[in-house]
Amino acid sequence: MNTARPMARPWLVAAVVIAPAAAGCTAETPPPASVPKPAPAQSTPAPRTASVTAFPPLAGRHPSGARIGIQDVAADGDRVVSVGQYSDGVSTATFGYSKDGGRTWRSGAAAATTWTAGEGASQVAVRTGRKPVTWVATGTAGKHFASWTSRDGTTWRRHFIDPAVIDPDTEDPGELVATSAGFFVVGRFVDAAGDSHPRIWASQDGVSWAERRLPGRAAVTGLAARDSILVAVGASDDDAFVWRSVDGGRTWAGVPRVPRVAIDEEFNRSLNDVAVDQRGFSPPATSTGWTAISR
């Protein structure tokens, strides 16, 4: 007689295994997967804005509709001076100054008690190499060119420039530069045919000016100085010019063989400005291809 035990029925085993889980009586629920917390949102810093100073209206002038245009600035340490034009129907040269590096501003005062129609200052420079410190501004006053001088950058005195020195009908002064040798304004004289001739006007005090005539046909556009050596640069329609003075700007000579930019034959060579450092005189770094032009 066969006495072998019958095989266990699989469904019974399965029932025993899964029954507790189905009943939920003895099995532990696994902990949920950890979810990373979102990073806290970073606050965006508020944009930093520059402070703006509202210059007060000039004494005796109507502030309604007045506009101030700032044309140039110069600095001596923390003292910064701005020049421009105040217009409320009559244009007047306007001056601003700051004693804290430009953080706060005040209006300068003009010693003149009368204004000239079409007046405005466009350039300012300061000479600090000798005492007293001298601030000079240049611009126009009616049909004349004019200069303004100050010892402290706050109170200014106007001076008309003799038309025999700078003729408003034929001469075009531009940038004002202060050097240890004095103040210089670069520009040009335009003849009846429309040709430009290089000119520089020099002054020791910003009041009396003398004309310097340079060789060539071009407009002088920039000037730099190291001690008594001065270098000026300029341009005509199709060429660049360099002039050099070794006597503090009293006499000038052209520098031959101005280096050519190796780009193509039709490249319009021009020099708009010049700078000086320990290596010598050279155009600004933006003048690609130029090297030092004088030492």
Image: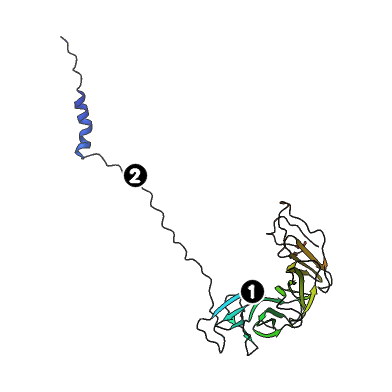
What residue is at 77 percent from the left and 77 percent from the top?
A: 202
* Residue at left offset 68%, top offset 85%: 158
Q: Contact, CB < 8 Å: mark 2 with mark 1? A: no
Amino acid type of the residue that numbered disc 2 sits on in the rendered structure? Ala
Residue that carries the numbered disc 2 in the rendered image: 33
Residue 101: in sight, yes or no?
no
Q: Does 126 sit above or below residue 236?
A: below
Residue 7 seen: yes
Task: Kindly give the residue lying farthest to the left in the view shown.
Answer: 1
Q: Position of residue 230 (x, y in %)?
A: 79, 69
For residue 141, which numbered disc appears in the image?
none
Residue 257 sits in quarter: bottom right
The local crowd at label 2, few if under 14, some if 14 to 19, many if 20 or more residues have their Cα within 10 Å, is few
Q: Quadrant of the N terminus?
A: top left
Residue 139 horizontal/vertical position (percent): 67, 78
Q: Choose between 154 and 203: the one closer to the eye.
A: 203
Q: Residues within 10 Å of mark 1 (few under 14, many from 20)?
A: some
174 vs 17, left or right, is right
Residue 149 lies in quadrant = bottom right
Q: Which residue is mark 1?
A: 72
Q: Secondary structure at mark 1?
A: strand
Tell me the element at label 2: loop
Q: Nearer the viewer, residue 15 or 163?
A: 163
Residue at x 22% of width, y 37% of height:
21
Image coordinates for residue 94, horizontal then vertical, percent: 61, 81
Q: Is residue 29 above or below residue 15?
A: below
Q: Amino acid at mark 1?
A: Asp
Name the residue rendered at 80%, 74% in the picture: 212
**Residue 113 locus on image (x, y percent):** 63, 90
Q: Can you name the residue that lies furthest to the front here?
A: 193
Q: Quadrant of the C terminus?
A: bottom right
Using the rendered view, name the quadrant where residue 274 is placed. Answer: bottom right
